[in-house]
Structure formats: C-alpha cells, structure tokens
Image (spheres, rainbow, N blue to C red):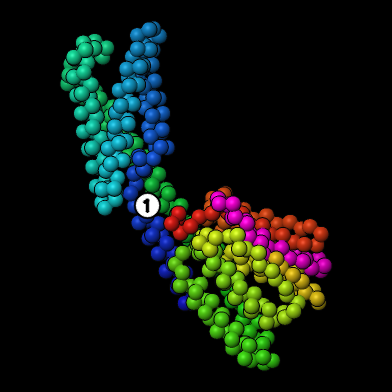
Amino acid sequence: MSTIKNDSKLNTKKQIKNSSEQNSLFLPDFCSLRMVFAVVIIGQLLAFVLTLAPLRMDQQLWNDLALISLFIQWNGLMCSAVLCLLRPVFKHYSNQFVALSSYLALLLMITFLSELTFYIMEIYYLTDIISSASHWEFLIHNLLIGGIISALALHYFYVQHQWRIKIQAESCTKLQLLQARIRPHFLFNSMNTIASLTRTRPEVAERITEDLAELFRMLFRDDHEMIAWARELSLSEHYIDIEKQRLGERLTIRWEVAAIPDDAMIPALLLQPLLENAIFHGIEPEINGGSITVTGEFDKTQLKITVQNTNSKNLVHRQGNKMALANIEERLEVHFHGKASIICHEENDIYFAVVSMPYQTKNDM
C-alpha cells in the first residue's frame, strides 16, 4: 500500500508539473477570435468613457466619439496583433520577462500609432479636434492612458493565470483522492475472489493472480487520469473474467460497444466500478444470478455508455451506499466541468446507469 501511495504522489506531482508547463505563459491567446472581440468591446467602452467625461451633449460629442473610437480600436487591435505575433517567442521565457517585454512592446506600439495619428491630423488639418494641438502633449497623454490600461490588463492576465494554475493543481489532487478510493476497493474484491479459489481450484487462482498482476501493472504505469477507451474496456474485461470464476454461470454479460472509437479518452476506472456495482447489487444476491449489458453510443461529439443489469429483489441489499456512483459523478465533474453526467434509473426490475461525456482524443487534451 505504501508503494501505491508513493506512486499516487508522484503522479500528482507529474500532473501538476505538466499542467504548469502547458500553461506557463500567463498571456492569453490574442490570436483567438474571443480575445479580439473582447479587445474591441473593451476599447469601445473606453471610448464612451473618454467621450462622455466632459458631460456635454452636442453634435461635436458624437464626432469626438467616432474619432476616439477609431483611434482606440486601432490601438487595441494593433497591440493585440503584436502580442499574438510575440506569443510563440514568449513561451521560452519567464513570466517576469514576458510581462516586461509585453509592456514595452505595447508602449512602443502606442507611441508609433500616436505619432502616425498626429501626422495624419496635421496633413488633413484635424489638430483642432484634440484638446491640445501640441505634439508632445498629445503623445504623453496617450502614453499615460495606454500605459495605465496596459499595466492593469497585464496584471489581470497574470492573476487569472495564477488562479487557473491553482484550480488545475487542486483538480489533480482531488482526482488522486477519488482514484485512491477506487483502487483499494477493486483490489480487495479481486483478492477475495482469488482467496475463494485457492483451495478448490489452485490452478485457476494462480492464473487469475497473474492476470490481476498484469492488470495492475497496466493501471499504475499510466501517469494520466484519462485513458483510451480500448484500454478501459480491456481492464473491465479482465475484471469480468475474474468475477466469472467466482460466480460461474450465474453471471451473463453482453458487450455492445463497437460504436465507441478505441481512441476516445475517458476517466480511468470509469466502467469497472459500474460493473462491480451491477454484480454486487443485482447479480450476486440472486441464486440464479442475472445478466449485464454494456452498450456504447457515439455521435461524433458525445459518448454514451450504458450499463444495465437485472436488479435484485432483495431491497436491503440493492439499496447500497451509492459511494461508487457519487465517486464517478465527482470525477466526471472534475474532468469535464459540467459537460458530463451520470444518470441512474430503474425500469421493470432493470437498473440503468448511463454515463454521457464529450468525445475527445489524446491530441485534444
């Protein structure tokens, strides 16, 4: 058990490190349409504030609003373009260097655009539309406003970045705690099966022990909490083989999961607890046993896995403590943030556990 705990701690550290490396740059992606739209909206709000500040309402106000909006949008979009182009270069440097370089780059762009704007106004005799026709006053005025806004924006991006890293680290830790509840439970049930076969069928017990050892080697060598569907299915089939040695003909299972792509990534040990629940609450209490059907559906964007089993007529036994289902629900929430769900219901003595989640591959993670 100490080895399992150490492996769990190492996995947590690796995941936090990987998350930090993947999100080391605090600047958002200014190449994305969402960020460009945000810059436009914020710029327009700033234009309204600067225009309405004098508290006057006349025709000149609307002219000023149009010119100020044009100037601010020009600055905002050009500065976003600069940060977009510099982002690939910034990935190799520390956040302190990125913050200072970004700030200087923004000030240089504001200076360049202010100089260009003033030059255009002089050519077309538009200098009377600004409060001061002085070249230096116009430049310093723009640099002060632009410098303050740029500093506030960079600080906001940094604070948001730190908050995101903290949430990811907490999620990794929470996943390890949730995973730790499943692994011992799975291990103990499997060991009980082996113990029951040791005296009566030692050769079968030996084979199951080897299968279990291989299964756990496959499970614990993975550093991620998401695994491919093909691997999860293999893990579940190993578990069913072990339970069949104990229950014999009392357990019947049908797999209808060909529709799910093998490369679909799902939380590790998602299917096995559902099968274990179905066996413990629906199959094991009945003398004649029962059947389990695992169905998989895929519509290019969403996966649906349904585990249905004949339910036990023993109301006390079938009530259970719902720990496995609550555990799966928490893990789905941590991984998919409200985009996945598990719904359980009963119809005509058949119990259904339906898990829905977005389809994603390893390249999407």
Q: Secondary structure at mark 1?
A: loop
Nearer to us in this view, 52 or 356: 356
Nearer to us in this view, 290 or 159: 290
Left or right? Give the position of 41 relative to 203. Answer: left
Residue furthest toward the top? Answer: 58
Measuring 36% from the left and 16% from the top, which residue is drawn there? 65
Picture quadrant of residue 156: top left
Nearer to us in this view, 36 or 318: 36
Picture quadrant of residue 64: top left
Q: In the image, which residues are magenta?
A: 294-319
Q: Is residue 105 magenta?
A: no
Measuring 77% from the left and 66% from the top, which residue is drawn there? 310
Q: Is residue 297 magenta?
A: yes
Left or right? Give the position of 201 relative to 310. Answer: left
Counting from the top left corner in percent of width and height, residue 148 is at 29, 31
Classify 290 as above or below 103: below
Counting from the top left corner in percent of width and height, residue 55 is at 39, 12
Counting from the top left corner in percent of width and height, residue 68 is at 32, 19
Classify 1 as above or below 110: below
Measuring 20% from the left and 23% from the top, which residue is drawn there? 116
Left or right? Give the position of 196 relative to 3. Answer: right
Is residue 325 something that shows in the picture? no
Counting from the top left corner in percent of width and height, residue 278 is at 70, 67
Is disc 1 surrounded by few (<14), some (14 to 19) or many (20+) residues within 10 Å? some
Q: How many marks?
A: 1
Measuring 68% from the left and 55% from the top, which residue is drawn there? 343
* Amino acid tagged 1: Asn
